[in-house]
Image (tube, rainbow, N blue to C red):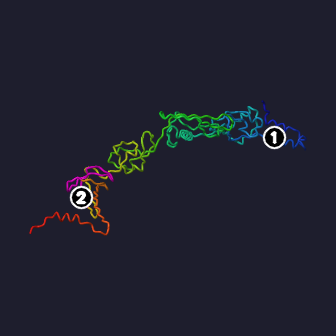
Amino acid sequence: MTFRPLLLAAVLIAALPAPALAGDGLSNWASDTAAFALPVLRANVAVTSDIVRIGDVIDNAGPAGQIAIYRAPDLGTTGSLPTAQVLTALRAHQVIGVDTKEIKQVTVTRLARNVESKDIQENVAHALEHRSGLGDAANLSLTFDRDLQDLYLDASNTGAMQPTTVRYEPRSNRFDVTFEIANDSGAAPTKLRFTGTAIETVEAAVLTRNVERTDILKSSDLIIERRPKAEIGGEAAARDRALGMQVRRSMRAGQALKAVDLVKPDLVQRDQGVTLIVQAAGLYLTTRGKALDNGTEGDVVSVLNLQSKRTVTGVVTGRGQVTIQIATPQPIVISDTGAAPAPTALADSTASVSSKPE
């Protein structure tokens, strides 16, 4: 379809004789002039489709507004066109006399819905949550078969990511999840499919150096990392719980601690000189001894009394201290029945004493 140049109308009006503009002709001329307002170039253009039309780049485009003149940039991107190039494209469709307002270039942005990679990962994790033995979404470590990047969808895709197919194989840790996103255009929903592996992880205290059984764990010895739950194989040790504790066995740097790996620190070491404390009601004695066992607070250990050379057992009560608690005999309580106890034992005792011969 061929459109008359918009500038031609203004030229024809200027050529009309003056009488033609008098009276009603003047009002008609004003309305005609308004109807043929000059096109004005736009500096910034935003489009939702994959093409740029004349009506996108100029105001007052008239019937020519629906004519496509350029392919739009990629979804979510922006491009620019020199003003001279835009005017050339417009003249090809008989649109002339454009007011450029001294614009040097026209910027064109393709509107889109941006689905960020972190949102994709969160949606996949929530879709897999509590399936086939998996735990909470926050504890799932996902690895995608393809590098996960931000997605740009047509701006009409305004719906939420709804999972329609969710598969997970525990033996291989493989997942296959498909989502649908509804749109405003009435077209079929957009489908997105993601595949990869999912592993449940837990927070664990991890050693930063090799440690021996006798080492006391310090803050610098531990860092927090997320490790596969299957690797831990039990309850992971929290960092706060591990501080000040010992390990049951020698362990290497990089190993994650389990709760069963930790023990209270030994307060008494084998062959260590210790203070042996003997306690009873109203009695408190100390002597030197040599521990024959390792022990932490509350453990029962054997100690050689260096004075008597006898081996005794006691409870570890402090660093280098073993306490022997002697039970105090309980007094015999005789209830008052109003009658004196029978002196049977005394009589027997008296009877067993031989009388002295005169």
Estimate the spatial distance between the alpha carbons at disc 2 and disc 1, rounded to whole Å: 116 Å
Q: Residues within 10 Å of mark 1 (few under 14, many from 20)?
A: few
Query: How many circles with numbers are drawn on the protein?
Result: 2
User: Toward the viewer: 288 or 132?
Assistant: 132
Magenta stretch holds residue 301: yes
x and y, in percent, of residue 98 in the image: 75, 38
Q: Is residue 63 above or below residue 263?
A: above
x and y, in percent, of residue 190 in the image: 63, 35
User: Toward the viewer: 37 or 199?
Assistant: 199
Q: Amino acid at mark 2?
A: Thr
The residue lying at 28 percent from left, 64 percent from top is 282
From which residue to which does the magenta span run? Answer: 285-311
- Identify residue for label 2: 287
Check the image and name the residue furthest to the left: 358
x and y, in percent, of residue 285 in the image: 25, 61
The residue lying at 23 percent from left, 57 percent from top is 288
Could you say whether the residue bearing mark 1 is in a helix, strand or loop? helix
- Identify residue for label 1: 35
Task: Locate residue 201 relative to residue 184 in the image: left or right.
Answer: left
- Residue 353, quarter of picture: bottom left
The residue lying at 89 percent from left, 42 percent from top is 25
